Amino acid sequence: MFNLTRSLDRNADRTPHEDAVIFRGARLTHLQLLDRVNALAAAFREAGVGKGDIVALLMGNRPEFLESALAVNRVGAAFLPLNVRLAEPELEYIIRHAGAVAVVTEPAFAGPAAAVGARLATRWTVVTAGQDAGAPAGAVCYEAFLGAHRGASVSPADVGEADLHRLMYSSGTTAHPKGVPITYRNLYWKTLGHVAEFGISAADRTAMAGPMYHVGAFDLPGIGTWWVGGSLVILPRFDVPDLLATVERERPTNIWLAPAMVNAVLNAVAQSPELGRHSTASIRFITGGGEKMPVTLIERLLAAFPNARFADAYGLTETVSGDTFNDAAHTLSKIGSVGKPVVNLDVKILGPDDTPVEPGAAGEIALRGPKVVSGYWKNPEATEAAFTPDGWFRTGDIGHLDSDGYLYIDDRKKDMIVSGGENVATSEVERVLYEHEAVLEAAVVGMPDARWGEVPRAFIVAKPGHEGLTADALIAHCRMRLASFKTPKEIVFLDLLPRNPSGKVLKRQLREIDSTGAEGTGVATTGER
């Protein structure tokens, strides 16, 4: 009774001719989507995929991603979304660790998928979507795979709330990514929380501009909109002109935008005023999150989307994301807050020895509720470390609750710089850097210092037209706004910041950059503290 794909039958029965999926102007109705998923499910079943199996999805944004996810669930199996940016050894580790038995991919990524499969001891099926003839030998064409079973009817497999719906691998800082098993219980409580938060209905239409292999595009609210009978507008990739033209043409009601995507939209509009003439009136809410956004950026975003609520959010893969959302009444009055938790999720701030702290005091953010996973895939040690004895999930993030119960993210535990015994929140330094008119993006990490242990080091991307920005000017700017021990002791200029698919800056990569040998960077240092 818990199978997600029961909604295929419901939607096809209630609104068979309404749009379910829109992609590059092409449309699939709810009835057409049901027919294609039924055929694909029959093909998987004939190939030996069944309950308890895992099928990898290695492809960009396209309808086949959604069809495959639903077909895999329909036969009682779970799907494994893979980041298309991963190198072959990274893919191989995840596929082996997950125990996937098949992959649905596209020609651009079919070579690595087939090469990994050739080294697996288990059966391995490669199904390739798209018309490109460059698929490797032995791969099965997606349309032929599906087409051989057109007209089939596959009943949704019986699954329980504890059964696996999806397996994802977190982009954490450990040596290898950790598998996050998302059950139907986790999925539905996440979805119910978002439906209640935003009043999502069949009248809604979600634009998927981020990568579908990430919870941002797939779950905020993503699949939840389709679950209640709405439609999904899938963009092949994030491209500002295409996004704005699609919003005007297809009139989606909501979208998830990572901070870097917000930055890109607003700066593109500033550089090309004609982009700003696209109508964005249909958007009623935007979900964001991942990094603190300065008030000026939020104000510009609200001006560009005049009918939208901006819901700054907080979440993790381990919670299927979207744990807290700031409300419309406090978008600007509680700037920096990610709001309050969704229904049936509790938030607590842990101090030393896991004792709760008073409002306003910083500590580790802990979460508990039915949308939180129960552990990591085949990793009991990581599971034990991630949970308190009474079942609270340790997020590894530092934050605080104000007296009204609104959550603020202060930093990652490992991003807190301890300089001469003083704690420096990198997010605070980044906020000040963003206040400089010439700064497009900023990220701060700690660097070793013989005297103080650690000192702040900033990485900067300058706005177009401000290539003459100097490190000395930024250090002076910070010195006027921060205590001396918080002021960056080194500034490194980059063309762009490394980010993961959710838009979060990969600070572990920044820590590995050698400022003395990095090409294309400008560096200035100060010995003062």
Image (cartoon, rainbow, N blue to C red):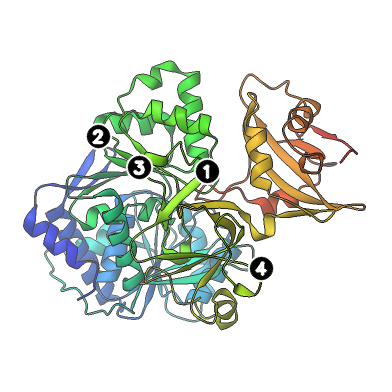
Name the element at disc 2. Answer: loop
Q: Relative to the observer, which residue lies in front, 402 or 168?
A: 402
Instruction: Give the number of the mark in front: 4 or 3.
Output: 3
Q: Is residue 441 left or right of residue 342?
A: right
State whether residue 139 is above or below residue 203.
below
Which mark is first along the chain, 1 or 4? 4
Q: Residue at x 30, y 79 (%)?
A: 48
Q: Which residue is tagged 1?
A: 336
Tag 3–tag 2 contact (CB < 8 Å):
no
Extreme-top residue of the structure: 273
Q: Residue 411 at x, y = what percent?
A: 62, 53
Q: Residue at x 47, y 28 (%)?
A: 266
Q: Which residue is tagged 3?
A: 255
Q: Is residue 495 visible?
A: no
Mark drawn on residue 359: none
Instruction: Give the number of the mark in front: 2 or 1.
Output: 1
Badge 1 crowding class, 10 Å Cα cut-off, few under 14, some 14 to 19, many 20 or more, is: many
- Type of residue at label 1? Gly
Q: Quadrant of residue 155?
A: bottom left
Mark drawn on residue 251: 2
